[in-house]
Amino acid sequence: MNSPEGNELEVLGILLDHYENENFPIGLPDPIEAIEFSMKQMGHNKIDLVNSIGLKSRATEILNR
Protein backbone atom coordinates (compact mmCIF):
# COMPACT_ATOMS: atom_id res chain seq x y z
CA MET A 1 0.00 0.00 0.00
CA ASN A 2 2.41 2.63 -1.19
CA SER A 3 -0.24 4.95 -2.57
CA PRO A 4 -2.00 7.80 -0.79
CA GLU A 5 -5.26 5.87 -0.93
CA GLY A 6 -3.60 2.75 0.44
CA ASN A 7 -2.03 4.69 3.28
CA GLU A 8 -5.37 6.32 4.08
CA LEU A 9 -7.08 2.93 4.09
CA GLU A 10 -4.44 1.55 6.45
CA VAL A 11 -4.86 4.49 8.87
CA LEU A 12 -8.65 4.13 8.76
CA GLY A 13 -8.32 0.42 9.54
CA ILE A 14 -6.09 1.14 12.54
CA LEU A 15 -8.49 3.81 13.81
CA LEU A 16 -11.48 1.50 13.36
CA ASP A 17 -9.72 -1.32 15.21
CA HIS A 18 -8.88 1.03 18.10
CA TYR A 19 -12.47 2.36 18.21
CA GLU A 20 -13.96 -1.14 18.31
CA ASN A 21 -11.53 -2.28 21.03
CA GLU A 22 -12.37 0.75 23.18
CA ASN A 23 -16.14 0.79 22.66
CA PHE A 24 -17.02 -2.85 22.07
CA PRO A 25 -14.48 -4.95 23.98
CA ILE A 26 -14.83 -8.70 23.72
CA GLY A 27 -14.09 -10.42 27.00
CA LEU A 28 -12.48 -13.78 27.39
CA PRO A 29 -14.86 -16.74 27.25
CA ASP A 30 -15.63 -18.87 30.28
CA PRO A 31 -13.10 -21.75 30.09
CA ILE A 32 -15.67 -24.50 30.72
CA GLU A 33 -18.08 -23.04 28.17
CA ALA A 34 -15.20 -22.89 25.68
CA ILE A 35 -14.41 -26.58 26.29
CA GLU A 36 -18.07 -27.55 25.91
CA PHE A 37 -18.44 -25.44 22.75
CA SER A 38 -15.31 -26.97 21.23
CA MET A 39 -16.46 -30.49 22.10
CA LYS A 40 -19.87 -29.83 20.52
CA GLN A 41 -18.31 -28.37 17.35
CA MET A 42 -16.11 -31.46 16.95
CA GLY A 43 -18.94 -33.88 17.74
CA HIS A 44 -17.23 -35.06 20.93
CA ASN A 45 -18.84 -36.04 24.21
CA LYS A 46 -17.79 -36.59 27.81
CA ILE A 47 -16.31 -40.00 26.98
CA ASP A 48 -13.99 -38.33 24.46
CA LEU A 49 -12.92 -35.88 27.16
CA VAL A 50 -12.27 -38.79 29.54
CA ASN A 51 -10.13 -40.43 26.86
CA SER A 52 -8.13 -37.20 26.49
CA ILE A 53 -7.71 -36.58 30.22
CA GLY A 54 -7.48 -40.17 31.39
CA LEU A 55 -9.74 -40.01 34.44
CA LYS A 56 -13.54 -39.96 34.44
CA SER A 57 -13.58 -38.23 37.82
CA ARG A 58 -11.31 -35.44 36.53
CA ALA A 59 -13.46 -34.91 33.42
CA THR A 60 -16.56 -34.72 35.61
CA GLU A 61 -14.82 -32.30 37.95
CA ILE A 62 -13.84 -30.06 35.04
CA LEU A 63 -17.27 -29.99 33.44
CA ASN A 64 -19.06 -29.49 36.77
CA ARG A 65 -16.54 -26.88 37.92
Image (cartoon, rainbow, N blue to C red):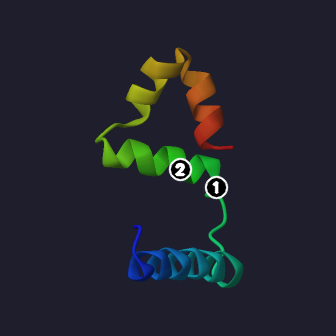
Q: Secondary structure at mark 1?
A: loop
- Residue 46 in picture, x, y percent from top left: 43, 34
Crowding near the residue tagged with mark 2, few <14, some 14–19, many ≥20 C-alpha atoms within 10 Å: few
Residue 21's tag is none
Dots 2, 1 in contact, CB < 8 A: yes
Which residue lies at the image location 40% right of the left edge and 27% below the top edge? 47
Q: Residue at x 56, y 82 (%)?
A: 16
- Three-letter residue code for mark 2: Ala
In the image, residue 3 sits, relative to residue 59, either above or below, namely below
Whole-percent x and y of residue 57? Answer: 61, 24
Task: State which quadrant residue 5 falls in.
Answer: bottom left
Which residue has dot 2 on it?
Answer: 34
Q: Give me the C-alpha separation between circle 2 and circle 1.
A: 6 Å
- Label ID, residue 30: 1
Q: How many marks?
A: 2
* Direction front: furthest residue: 3
Q: Secondary structure at mark 2?
A: helix
Closer to the camera in the image, 40 or 24 = 24
Residue at 60% in and 81% down: 15
Q: Locate residue 55 relative to residue 49 in the image: left or right.
A: right
Quadrant placement of the C terminus? top right
As drawn, the residue found furthest toward the top would be 54
Q: Is residue 5 left or right of residue 13?
A: left
Dot 1, how many residues are within 10 Å of its Cα: few (below 14), some (14-19), or many (20+)? Answer: few
The residue drawn where x is 71% and y is 79% is 22
Front-most of 28 and 42? 28
- Residue in front for this viewpoint, 20 or 40: 20
Given residues 26 and 30, the one toward you in this image is 26
